């Protein structure tokens, strides 16, 4: 177990270094001189030179990279070109709302998807199964922004009952819950289909297994067979597959945040890229990449915890 | 039999994505075209999907001849006309005919999708065959593919747009990169099965070159798996590309692109919803058609489901 985890950890380190290197090189291709930018347009040559010395800009590239890593480790990702706010501060402000949105989406989408998938697998080939699968295919084909704009039109304009711009408050207040409903339906809506599909496949495999036949032969009730003997085993691969689909969720989150003006990290990243705010763009991309590597690592380890067969390899 | 079991187990390993799991089933099974065609046409859903795909491709290719007006011709006296009032489907925020914009938008979107899938599959295919044929290379190549696979496509989109600036090219590069590892896994999976067949050994004993064996004997027997993957991937790539364009990272105005058009319509959502809804509907229909078609193809090519 520990060996498996350590092995994974060792494999992750070069990838992280690669991400940081790409992030670092991203800043190198920019034609503007960072020392000049920091000094301001009226600074004398001496001041610019002093800042260049201070930032280590006349060191060889590999030394600069080392300095860059060192600054990164201290949480210094530079300052936004647009409004002079430290990148780390903006990241800290936006990561919360993004996690909040993801949480509010998954809390209903995963249970619903699992329920639909289980029902579909149990009544395999029936009309219900076909309807659920059709719904699932439609769900993965639906553009996220279409669902979002449709909901805004329906519940923000036609029946104006829910707010649809920005975060209206923390999740534990009534205003906050109201504000998160439409974005959460949008983001969760595209996730139900894949979860239903994965659960169905997994439950189908499990329903044909020997131990399920044994459970039936023992004369156990159908609900016990399905819930206790099938679903529990079937959920192991589903849990890890969901972990791997977090990337899919992030793609949806970036679009959802833009549609609903949700103050999250995805919207921050897009805004930074569109306004050529390179330090901010670089910071968000590095942050998201590192987040991903960690999520994948966690899923890998979780998989080994849940399925003992993987540990040996 | 044992190989297919192995493939299925592999599909549940961390790092495997749903498309790959779907495709691995159809791996390396030579099928008569007639059977596939009969199975496809026996199902109404796949018939409609096939018709939609053909229609979309025709519309995109023939856009310059089909479009009633100039795609960039503003008509500021007739902006935001609802469908039926001005042209069949109304006009957008700058008075441009919606039918024309939709046809050209579809053209851009499909072009973006085919370019990404073509580049991604070409590179991914080469890597996949190399990894299957040369076991020594396999470890390094597939480990690298795993790394690529661990990042979501949207992140490539953001990073490439940050480096090269927003635009169609950035989207194509990003989606190609995101396609490479998926294709490499599909190709490697089915090529490994093919390589165990007797005729490969026969070809080797004849002293044929590696390239010749791969091109003449391995590739043709992997085509069904590749075909299913490409169909399903095309739908996903269009959806991703449209989303990136919606965010403003893809096609730039005045280029007509379905995702960008939907974003443009946001400003008039409450009084001229058709500007956003129509391009979104077209994307939905095309992606749905590709997904349904890909699913039916996979079922038709799956030896376990075929009688």
Image (cartoon, coloured by chain):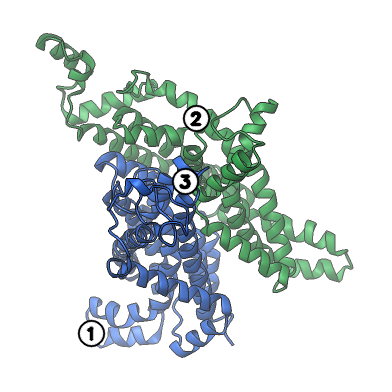
- Among the 4 quarters of the image, the one containing residue A24: top left
The colour of chain A is: green
Residue indicated by mark 3: A251
Relative height, residue A163 to residue B10 (above, below): above
- Among the 4 quarters of the image, the one containing residue B202: bottom left
Query: Residue B184 at what x, y percent from top left?
Result: 37, 63
Residue indicated by mark 1: B207
Residue indicated by mark 2: A263
Tell me which chain the residue with mark 1 is part of: B
Query: Residue B247 at what x, y percent from top left?
Result: 40, 43
Disc 3 on helix, strand or loop? Answer: helix
Q: Residue furthest left?
A: A45
Q: Mark 1 vs mark 2: same chain?
A: no
Is residue B65 visible to the viewer in this orientation of the structure?
yes
**With B292 as the anchor, is A48 left or right in this view?**
left
Question: Which part of the image, by quadrant, shows the N terminus of chain B?
Answer: bottom right
As measured in the structure, the alpha-carbon distance from the residue carrying label 3 to the one carrying label 1 is: 49 Å
- Circle 2 crowding by C-alpha within 10 Å: few under 14, some 14–19, many from 20: some
Q: What's the mark number on residue A270? A: none
Q: Nearer the viewer, mark 2 or mark 3?
A: 2
**With A135 as the anchor, is A285 left or right in this view?**
left
Relative height, residue A7 to residue B122 (above, below): above
């Amino acid at each position: 177990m520990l060996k498996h985890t350590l092995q994974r950890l060792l494999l992750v380190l070069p990838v992280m270094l690669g991400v940081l290197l790409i992030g670092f090189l991203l800043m190198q291709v920019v034609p503007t001189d960072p020392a000049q930018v920091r000094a301001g347009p009226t600074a004398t040559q001496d001041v610019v030179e002093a800042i260049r010395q201070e930032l280590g800009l006349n060191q060889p590239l590999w030394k600069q990279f080392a300095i860059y890593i060192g600054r990164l480790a201290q949480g210094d990702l530079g300052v936004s070109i647009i409004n002079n706010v430290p990148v780390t501060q903006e990241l800290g402000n936006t990561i919360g709302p993004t996690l909040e949105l993801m949480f509010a989406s998954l809390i209903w989408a995963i249970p619903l998807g699992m329920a639909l998938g289980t029902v579909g697998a149990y009544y395999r080939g029936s009309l219900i199964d076909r309807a659920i699968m059709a719904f699932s295919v439609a769900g993965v084909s639906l553009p996220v922004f279409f669902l979002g704009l449709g909901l805004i039109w329906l519940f923000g304009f036609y029946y104006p009952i829910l707010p649809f711009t920005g975060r209206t408050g923390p999740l534990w207040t009534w205003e906050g819950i109201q504000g998160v409903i439409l974005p959460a339906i949008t983001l969760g809506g595209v996730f139900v289909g894949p979860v239903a599909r994965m659960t169905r496949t997994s439950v189908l495999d499990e329903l044909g297994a020997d131990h399920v036949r044994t459970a039936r032969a023992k004369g156990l009730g159908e609900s016990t067979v399905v819930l206790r003997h099938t679903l529990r085993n079937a959920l192991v691969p589903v849990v890890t597959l969901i972990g791997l689909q977090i990337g899919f969720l992030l793609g949806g989150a970036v679009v959802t945040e833009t549609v609903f003006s949700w103050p999250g990290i995805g919207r921050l990243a897009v805004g930074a890229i569109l306004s050529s705010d390179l330090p901010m763009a670089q910071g968000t991309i590095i942050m998201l990449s590192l987040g991903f590597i960690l999520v994948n690592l966690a899923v890998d380890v979780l998989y080994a915890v849940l399925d003992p067969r993987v540990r040996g390899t | 039999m044992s190989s297919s079991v192995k493939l299925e187990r592999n599909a549940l390993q961390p790092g495997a994505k749903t498309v790959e799991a779907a495709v691995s089933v159809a791996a390396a099974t030579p099928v008569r075209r007639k059977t596939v065609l009969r199975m496809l046409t026996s199902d109404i859903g796949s018939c409609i999907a096939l018709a939609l795909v053909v229609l979309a491709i025709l519309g995109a290719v023939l856009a310059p001849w089909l479009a009633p007006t100039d795609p960039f011709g503003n008509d500021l006296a007739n902006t935001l006309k609802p469908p039926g009032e001005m042209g069949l489907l109304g006009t957008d925020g700058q008075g441009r005919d919606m039918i024309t914009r939709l046809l050209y938008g579809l053209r851009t979107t499909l072009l973006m999708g085919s370019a990404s899938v073509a580049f991604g599959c070409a590179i991914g295919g080469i890597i996949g065959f190399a990894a299957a044929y040369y076991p020594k290379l396999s470890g390094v190549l597939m480990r690298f593919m795993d790394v690529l696979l661990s990042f979501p496509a949207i992140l490539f989109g953001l990073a490439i747009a940050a480096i090269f600036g927003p635009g169609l090219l950035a989207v194509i590069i990003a989606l190609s990169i995101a396609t490479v590892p998926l294709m490499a896994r599909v190709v490697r999976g089915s090529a490994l099965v093919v390589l165990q067949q007797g005729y490969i050994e026969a070809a080797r004993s004849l002293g044929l070159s590696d390239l010749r064996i791969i091109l003449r004997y391995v590739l043709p027997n992997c085509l069904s798996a590749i075909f299913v993957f490409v169909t399903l991937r095309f739908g996903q790539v269009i959806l991703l590309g449209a989303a990136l364009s919606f965010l403003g990272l893809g096609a730039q105005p005045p280029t007509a692109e379905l995702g960008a058009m939907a974003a443009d319509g946001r400003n008039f959502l409450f009084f001229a919803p058709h500007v956003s809804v129509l391009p979104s509907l077209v994307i939905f229909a095309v992606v749905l058609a590709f997904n349904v078609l890909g699913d039916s193809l996979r079922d038709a090519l799956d030896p376990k489901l075929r009688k």
